[in-house]
Amino acid sequence: MQGFDWPKLLRAGLRGLGLRPDEFWALTPAELRLMLGEDSGEVPMGRSRLEELIAAFPDEVKGEVS
């Protein structure tokens, strides 16, 4: 089992969430995960969905006439 990546968690808490050190260290792991959105139930977009969006909304090149 791997340990916690404390530097990454501290950056997420202090920089990302704007917590003070005492607030960060007072959180339980479950509270921190919830605040970071890990238990939101949302799945990151996969490659196939990205391809669908690219096809539906192609970039327009400036100066190109359609």
Image (tube, helix red, strand yellow):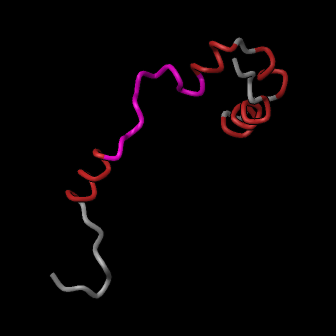
Residue 40 falls within the magenta-colored stretch: yes
- What residue appears at the point 42 percent right and 36 percent down from the top-left corner? 44
Residue nearest the viewer, comparing 34 with 3: 3
Quadrant of the image occupied by residue 18 = top right
Report the span colored magenta.
35-47
Horizontally, residue 10 falls left or right of residue 55, namely right
**From what the image shows, is residue 51 above or below residue 24?**
below
Quadrant of the image occupied by residue 43 = top left
Q: Residue lying furthest front in this view?
A: 1
- What residue appears at the point 24 percent right and 60 percent down from the top-left corner? 57
Where is residue 6? Give x, y as percent. 78, 29
Q: Residue lying furthest right in this view?
A: 22
Would you say the magenta stretch is mainly helix, strand or loop?
loop
- Image quadrant occupied by the N terminus: top right
Where is residue 54? Give x, y as percent. 27, 58
Horizontally, residue 32 falls left or right of residue 43, namely right
